[in-house]
Amino acid sequence: MKKVRRCILLVCLLPVIVFPIRLPAQQAITGKTPSLKEVFKDDFVIGTALNRTQIEERDPLAAAFIPRQFSAFTPENDMKAVMIHPQWGTYNFSEADKIIAYSQKHHMRINGHTLIWHSQLPVFVRRMQDKDSLHRFFVEHISTIASRYKGKVYSWDVVNEALNEDGTMRNSIFREKLGEDYVVEAFKLAQQAAPGTMLYYNDYNIERPEKRAGAITLVKKIQAAGVRIDGIGIQGHWHIDQVPLKDIEQSILEFSSLGVKVMFTELDISVLPDPIGSNGADISQNTAYNAALNPYVNGLPDSLQSKLAGSYEDLFRLFLKYKNKISRITFWGVNDGNSWLNNWPVRGRTNYPLLFDRHFNPKPAFYKVIATKTRNTDRTASH
Ligand code: 9MR
């Protein structure tokens, strides 16, 4: 008898257990939840970073969810040099080719990421001692990849993170061996190999005044050499306690006055204690785990959930104000579970930096973002 009652109880509770998790995700897929790419379609392209599991569509829920919300993507890792060019003269195009196939299947734009970056370089490059070998790698790498994917990727982050925080050039292997003009040469090579592809410079913290000035110098140098640069990507890895709205606004104005488009290319907002005290994405900075640094393992408190929603609302209001200067907003990950911020600057934490939770449910921040558009439209309509 007891067994029967337990069974009945279980059957009654089952929908309650399952639906709060499943239903909103299903809604986000089937059309009851607004779609970011649709809501902002007259303003800017909405992108996300995709990892290999997502490109290969191994999770059916994610596979249905992603193309509904986003019209563009940046491969999170699979086009980086270490992945695509693991040994001298040996390329591994298999993942990148899947990326192209995925984009064609879902009519999503690819931002290729990235041709030249000091990080995630293959070992053979890191070991190179002489200038000539590095230069040969540099030329071959850019030319081979940019020409192979010509007409298939919409844009390239040609050079990623070439600047120090004070706006001077980072002392990477490229600068050390090829000199500061390597950036200009990288854009020139990309332009030759892929004439119709958009070419961007991408970095974090370049909204900050000193680093921004460095980025402006860099862009002017490229332009003065008669080489094309189409846009600047402000990565947008921010912390909830310091989303630098003023600096962002000033950067949109200053960058766009150079005649290039501005993009927010890796947007996320960390809500966890920040042991290194800086926005940004310097992956060489790491701190050891301790429980105090990971306070929200069982969920984000409402107060922080609202604060996050408010930060995203402020950002999207600003983005909309300058929609004529901004071409794309890309989130660095689809949902909170995918975010690199669960492992940086401390490994193994539970962070909540994006608009969708670990089950693809839209968070309050999502609805605030959507509302910026509705209210914006209402205001415009009433005038
Ligand atoms: O999100 C990426 C993570 O999976 C990688 O482990 C990491 C390694 O370098 O790179 C992350 O993406 C970075 C991007 O390529 C460039 N800007 C900073 C991003 C976050 O570190």
Image (cartoon, rainbow, N blue to C red):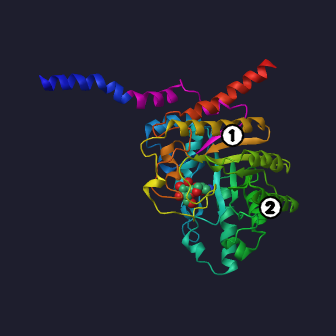
Q: Which mark is on residue 218?
A: 2
Image quadrant of residue 131? bottom right
Residue linked to disc 1: 315
The verdict on residue 31 being magenta is yes
Q: Residue at x 56, y 74 (%)?
A: 124
Q: Quadrant of the N terminus?
A: top left
Q: Amino acid at mark 1?
A: Leu
SS for callout 2: helix
Furthest toward the bottom, the residue is 130
Q: CA distance from mark 1 to mark 2?
A: 26 Å
As drawn, is 172 to the left or to the right of 294?
right
Residue 242 appears at what percent x and percent y? 65, 49
Q: Nearer the viewer, mark 1 or mark 2?
A: 1
> Can see residue 198?
no
SS for callout 1: helix
Q: Residue at x 78, y 38 (%)?
A: 322
Instruction: Please name whichever residue, 183 or 378, is drawn nearer the observer in this view of the structure.
Output: 378
Q: Residue at x 48, y 54 (%)?
A: 293
Q: Quadrant of the C terminus?
A: top right
Please tell me whether residue 30 is drawn above or below residue 354 in the rendered image. Answer: above
The image quadrant in which ligand 1 is located: bottom right
Please tell me whether residue 303 is drawn above or below residue 236 in the rendered image. Answer: above
Give the magenta range.
19-48
Instruction: Please name whichever residue, 351 or 242, is drawn nearer the observer in this view of the structure.
Output: 242
Q: Amino acid at mark 2?
A: Leu
> Can see residue 344?
yes
Q: How many residues crowd mark 1 within 10 Å: few (<14), some (14–19), many (20+)?
A: some
Residue 21 appears at what percent x and percent y? 41, 32
